[in-house]
Image: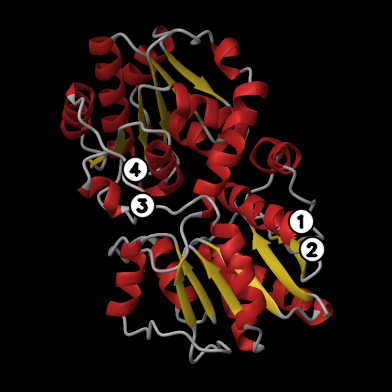
Amino acid sequence: MNRKKIITIIGARPQIIKAAAISRAIRIHFSDKLEEIIVHTGQHYDENMSEVFFTELGIPSPNHNLQIGSGNHGAQTGRMMIGLEEIFILEKPDAVLVYGDTNSTVAGALAAAKIHIPLIHVEAGLRSFNKAMPEELNRIACDHMSTLLFTPSSNGLENLAKEGFDLSTHTKASIDQPNIYHCGDVMYDNSMYFADLSAQKSTILNELGITNDHFILCTIHRDSNTDDPEKLNAIFSALLKIQQDSGWTIILPLHPRARKKMEEGLLPETKAFLASNNKIQLIPPTGFLSIIALERNAQLIITDSGGLQKEAFFFGKPCVILREQTEWIEIVQNGNAILTGADEEKIIHAFTSLTAREDFTFPNFYGDAKAAEFICSKIISDL
């Protein structure tokens, strides 16, 4: 049997991590039936943001790197489409696989669909119902160009049904008759797979001096928060208040761009408070094994990241979500997380409410940690 060739497109750090699950499943279970070509668009690329993830997660190095870099949405997406189309014509894949909702995702979707290559979308069906978010536009467009759609949650399946997708499956899927599956979450696969490795290898807790300390893990990267000085100052005012009232350490890994926006946008008095408070530790971006160590040992997570919302749930941690909406609505509905936006009072109230609770439950929303194996099996059978 000839192997099916799939091109996996990655461009941002979360996609590199997600790709580890599929690459691992192919290597262990499907190497005789699937060949994977990895293309890195270069949407995010530096050693901390990309290369360390390939090394520690055992992902094959990219076969192609477009080295696109940052830029306005239209220019960035256009350059990606040009480069990806050239690679698709060269490699002649049986399908293109994309993750999530970035510009790399929608560029891959458009480039593949326009030259009639079947598209596989992992993390299909997620909706924030806020089209002011570029990610929302990307994920909707991608779903409607896909031949195979894999949704991690039952809410994702419901969203697709409401948009008119036929949930019945076909022997051979096509762009006009796509097959849709609720498969679980590849990030749950990864979190469970790498948790033990993280415990063995990560030294970040000792490095930060928080081994036996109460601490909060916080991440802030979304443009809507970092690029609005009013929102950014509200978030940091809330963090300072939470730290002072609780006495807990706050660990804040910062993307270089977010750090630059802090320098530009924070009020002088807020900068001074941060500089004088050694309990708020601003650190560079960390590898996935270190992030898992921080997630597993934190008392609570504060984030505007979609990925960390789920990972907080995976590891049984309450979460304050610095957004007005979330695609992972089930964790909010179940009481594991609270949406606050960048409202200082709401952030503080959410922290107080979550730390006072002792009756959290963690239902099995995200599958059996074998989503990647399921996805690979359907690629083989349905295309």
Q: Amino acid at mark 4?
A: Asp
Residue 245 figure quarter:
top left
Q: Are marks 2 and 1 in contact (CB under 8 Å)?
A: yes
Could you tell me how far apart the alpha carbons at marks 3 and 2 are, in whole angstroms? Answer: 29 Å
Question: Of residues 236 and 60, which is closer to you in this image?
Answer: 60
Q: Amino acid at mark 1?
A: Arg
Could you tell me how far apart the alpha carbons at marks 3 and 4 are, in whole angstroms? Answer: 34 Å
Q: What quarter of the picture does the C terminus occupy? A: bottom right
* Relative side of 340 to 79, left or right: left
Q: Residue at x 59, y 18 (%)?
A: 204
Residue assigned mark 2:
31
Residue 382, above or below 96? below
Residue 216, above or below 345? above
Residue 218 percent coordinates (x, y): 41, 29
Residue 63 percent coordinates (x, y): 82, 60
Residue assigned mark 1:
27
Q: Any mark on residue 228, and which? A: 4
Residue 108 percent coordinates (x, y): 62, 72
Which callout, 3 or 4, points at the residue further toward the start of the chain? 4
Residue assigned mark 3:
365
Q: Residue furthest bottom?
A: 176
